[in-house]
């Protein structure tokens, strides 16, 4: 069953093409987006830092200058995750002590989007410290899933996915270390891409506690796009990429695929498995070769444990743990060694397989809970399972620094379901192209 769509509004490239053809102006495109936000966002609360006046001024400036050949998003209204700096706007990471933290300059990703002709109309909601699969914080309040307002849009890029899924904007940029692009895409029924680590700069995306000090791009963490189709996703990825990307050009029908739907200690609910199995059946019927088991499968449960240690250490920047102990340099180098071994296992697998298919999360969009979802249990096939176990499906691509594209492939009970398409490092465009092929077969 095809996934539920909430809007038939054009995508980013389609909007840009209409503007270049003279069918509408940048100002009209931005005006229309603002009108959609004013109509829809009172119920969703995705765009929590509107910047409408400056967006209209920027649209008028674009009209006066006219498009150039290097502006694929000329006049396209977009939003961006609250944690990216935009000059003159707050960057709080959802934390009340930083409610008046005003950015002095644009982040590199915002600079690239503006140079490509995009018009940023506002910033979207996040959980505190970008560390939950919900978006609820004391600065901006709670964001609702546009499919069901009683449910989460995912996190931490939940406001991002909600703004795209609802049709307020055509495209967004979020970040991902624990599924923060992929889970919202899955929960909201849009496309999302976690790039190969190091592909896209996160300069200007840093915790406000650093007080503007320069910081690296973050171990494991990446910036990635969300959109409503694969072509927009690829265009956004190329705009953000810091290195050239090539396509293999290999047709999906010629690819060998491994389906990984189980990890020890990380069960997946039938509401996710059923659409995944239906998608695999459709792919196999079309001629795609899919294996369910392989001796080349990495040690996913072991990698998950090391991934959690590395992620928690990196996000805390080495601060003392709850028990007061402090990570040592030796521990950190052991984690780097474990990550290198993980990368080698995946390289070995990809010498035989082109892609791996996996669930983005063990459940569909969750009901709102107070506090962090990761302190609660998930209902998985009638059993209560600690929510952090679900991070295994984020770490499957994060720990080995691999690209992963989430494609909507079905629904259960009117809630959308996606699949991760994971490929070799730097094969980002191939992952998106495979997603486009999967979409054509499964959603037809």
Image (tube, rainbow, N blue to C red):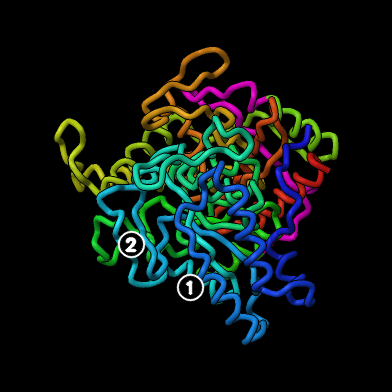
What numbered label is drawn on residue 111?
Answer: 1
Residue at the spot 53% in from the left edge and 57% down from the top edge: 173
How far is the residue under mark 1 from the one under mark 2?
A: 18 Å
Q: Nearer the viewer, residue 329 or 265?
A: 265
Residue at the spot 48% in from the left edge and 45% down from the top edge: 180
Residue at the spot 76% in from the left edge and 45% down from the top edge: 439
Name the quarter where the C terminus is drawn.
top right
Horizontal relation, residue 429 to residue 283: left or right: left
Q: Residue furthest top?
A: 382
Instruction: Look at the image and tell me whether residue 344 can be seen.
Output: no
Horizontal relation, residue 183 to residue 125: left or right: right
Query: Is residue 401 found inside the magenta-colored segment of the image?
Result: no
Q: Label 1 neighbourhood size at 10 Å, few (<14), some (14-19), many (20+)?
A: some
Against 201, residue 157 (above or below) is: above
Report x, y in % for residue 201. 44, 65
Q: Which residues are magenta?
A: 247-273
- The residue at which mark 2 appears reads as 216
Q: Residue furthest bottom?
A: 65
Q: Nearer the viewer, mark 1 or mark 2?
A: 1
Name the quarter where the N terminus is drawn.
top right
Q: Residue furthest left?
A: 324
Report x, y in % for residue 141. 41, 42
Q: Nearer the viewer, residue 32 or 101?
A: 32
Give the mark, 1 or 2, whose residue is nearer the N terminus.
1
Horizontal relation, residue 245 to residue 141: left or right: right
What numbered label is drawn on residue 394?
Answer: none
Report x, y in % for residue 407. 67, 44
Mark 2 lies on a secondary structure that is loop
Query: Is residue 248 found inside the magenta-colored segment of the image?
Result: yes
Against 431, residue 331 (above or below) is: above
Q: Label 2 neighbourhood size at 10 Å, few (<14), some (14-19), many (20+)?
A: few
């Amino acid at each position: 069953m095809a996934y539920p769509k909430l809007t038939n509004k054009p995508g980013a490239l389609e909007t840009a093409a209409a503007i270049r053809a003279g069918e509408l102006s940048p100002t009209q495109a931005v005006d229309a987006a603002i009108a959609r936000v004013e109509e829809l966002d009172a119920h969703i609360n995705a765009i929590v830092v509107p910047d409408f006046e400056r967006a209209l001024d920027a649209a008028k400036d674009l009209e006066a200058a006219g498009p150039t050949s290097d502006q694929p998003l000329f006049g396209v209204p977009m939003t961006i995750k609250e944690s990216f700096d935009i000059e003159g706007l707050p960057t709080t990471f959802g934390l009340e002590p930083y409610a008046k933290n005003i950015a002095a300059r644009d982040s590199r990703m915002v600079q690239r989007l503006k140079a490509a002709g995009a018009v940023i109309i506002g910033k979207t909601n996040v959980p505190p410290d970008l560390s939950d699969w919900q978006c609820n914080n004391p600065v901006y309040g709670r964001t609702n899933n546009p499919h069901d307002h009683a449910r989460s849009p995912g996190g931490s890029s939940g406001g991002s996915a909600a703004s795209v899924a609802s049709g307020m904007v055509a495209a967004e940029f979020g970040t991902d270390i624990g599924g923060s692009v992929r889970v919202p895409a899955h929960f909201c029924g849009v496309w999302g891409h976690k790039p190969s680590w190091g592909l896209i700069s996160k300069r200007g995306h840093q915790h406000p506690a650093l007080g503007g000090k320069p910081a690296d791009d973050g171990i494991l963490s990446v910036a990635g796009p969300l959109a409503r189709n694969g072509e927009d996703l690829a265009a956004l990825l190329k705009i953000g990429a810091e290195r050239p990307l090539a396509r293999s050009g290999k047709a999906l029908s010629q690819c060998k695929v491994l389906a990984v739907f189980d990890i020890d200690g990380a069960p997946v609910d039938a509401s996710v498995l059923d659409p995944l199995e239906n998608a695999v059946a459709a792919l196999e019927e079309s001629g795609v070769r899919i294996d369910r088991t392989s001796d080349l499968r990495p040690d996913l449960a072991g990698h998950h444990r090391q991934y959690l240690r590395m992620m928690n250490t990196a996000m805390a920047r080495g601060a003392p743990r709850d028990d007061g102990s402090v990570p040592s340099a030796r521990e950190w180098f052991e984690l780097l060694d474990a990550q290198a071994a993980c990368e080698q296992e995946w390289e070995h697998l990809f010498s035989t397989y082109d892609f791996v298919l996996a669930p983005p999360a063990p459940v569909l969009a969750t009901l709102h809970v107070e506090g962090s979802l990761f302190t609660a249990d998930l209902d998985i096939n009638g059993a209560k399972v600690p929510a952090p176990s679900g991070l295994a499906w984020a770490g499957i691509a994060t720990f080995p620094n691999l690209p992963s594209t989430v494609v909507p492939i079905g629904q259960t009970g009117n809630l959308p379901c996606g699949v991760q398409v994971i490929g070799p490092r730097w094969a980002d465009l191939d992952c998106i192209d495979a997603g486009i092929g999967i979409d054509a077969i499964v959603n037809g």
